[in-house]
Image (cartoon, rainbow, N blue to C red):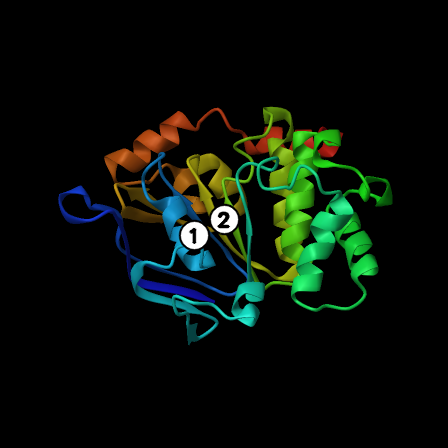
């Protein structure tokens, strides 16, 4: 579903040029979840933004569903890929109701049955019709992120790009949002490209992942590799050690208790 071949992104000019992404290549199978992991500044979010079309100055090849994407995207290409951002409050307009936030993408893409789509999207992310006319400041962090996920899904995309979707949330709602994302991918047969600085969080959602450092991929691995502790690169092992505090068992318990 996604193919990146030699993707490079640079910022600045002359002696001030910075190569944020340096010849990154990987593939993501349809219906699977692929993670990009690394510390802040490693280039992982820049890769995501290039795929999303939010960065136009890139080199290499980006291919989606067998078709190469150019630097300017059509409406159909943009609808096919939707993105969930890190900060659920910053990504939602503070003066718009949830209804307006979810209706606007439908209107832009000229979709019918907007009202019904809004209700269905809220229900799918675990929010009832009572949330439809609330403002972002009237919602908890977890509820705001659910609205952001609903906004991405309302256009019926095939690919969802996730930029650290739980890092701005309270620890108590991390697992709930992660498990929601896992269930939505299974139900809708979505393809995920998931960015995080936390290896264990990515392993909870993704079957395969790549570790990035200073704009390059230093190691490709699977969730099984993480479980077995068989990572080879010292930087990858360091990231894994720093994320040992996250527990899958704790995630299941928190999700079952309905926290957040």
Q: Residue placed at 81% from the left, 65% from the top?
A: 113
- Mark 2 surroundings: few (<14), some (14-19) or many (≥20) residues within 10 A: many
Residue 1 % position (x, y): 47, 67
Can you say whether 255 is above or below 187 in the image?
A: above
Outermost residue, left direction? 15
Outermost residue, bottom direction? 67
Outermost residue, front direction? 95
Residue 206 numbered mark, or none = 2
Residue 100 numbered mark, or none = none
Q: Helix or strand or loop: what does disc 2 sit on?
A: loop
Outermost residue, right direction? 130
Q: Which is nearer the N-term, disc 2 or disc 1? A: 1
Residue 49 numbered mark, or none = 1
Residue 41 % position (x, y): 32, 37
Q: Helix or strand or loop: what does disc 1 sit on?
A: helix
Q: Nearer the viewer, residue 136 or 42?
A: 136
Give the spatial CA distance, label 2 vs label 1: 19 Å
């Amino acid at each position: 579903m996604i193919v990146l071949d030699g993707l490079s992104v640079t910022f600045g000019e002359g002696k001030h040029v910075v190569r944020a992404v340096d010849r990154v290549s990987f593939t993501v199978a349809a219906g699977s979840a692929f993670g990009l992991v690394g510390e802040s500044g490693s280039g992982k979010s820049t890769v995501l933004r290039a795929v999303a079309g939010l960065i136009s100055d890139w080199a290499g090849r980006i291919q989606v569903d067998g078709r190469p994407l150019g630097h300017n995207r059509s409406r159909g290409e943009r609808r096919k890929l939707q993105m969930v951002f890190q900060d659920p409050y910053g990504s939602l307009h503070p003066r718009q109701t949830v209804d307006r936030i979810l209706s606007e993408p439908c209107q832009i893409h000229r979709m019918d049955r907007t009202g019904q789509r809004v209700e269905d999207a809220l229900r799918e992310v675990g929010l009832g019709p009572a949330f439809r006319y609330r403002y972002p400041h009237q919602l908890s962090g977890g509820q705001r992120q659910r609205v952001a996920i609903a906004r991405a899904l309302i256009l019926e995309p095939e690919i969802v790009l996730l930029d650290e979707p739980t890092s701005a949330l309270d620890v108590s709602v991390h697992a709930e949002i992660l498990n929601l994302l896992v269930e939505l991918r299974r139900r809708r047969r979505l393809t995920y490209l998931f960015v995080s600085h936390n290896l264990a969080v990515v392993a909870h959602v993704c079957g395969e992942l790549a570790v990035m450092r200073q704009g390059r991929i230093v190691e490709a691995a699977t969730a099984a590799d993480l479980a077995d502790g068989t990572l080879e690169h010292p930087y990858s092992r360091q990231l894994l050690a720093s994320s040992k505090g996250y527990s899958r068992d704790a995630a299941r318990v928190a999700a079952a208790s309905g926290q957040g």
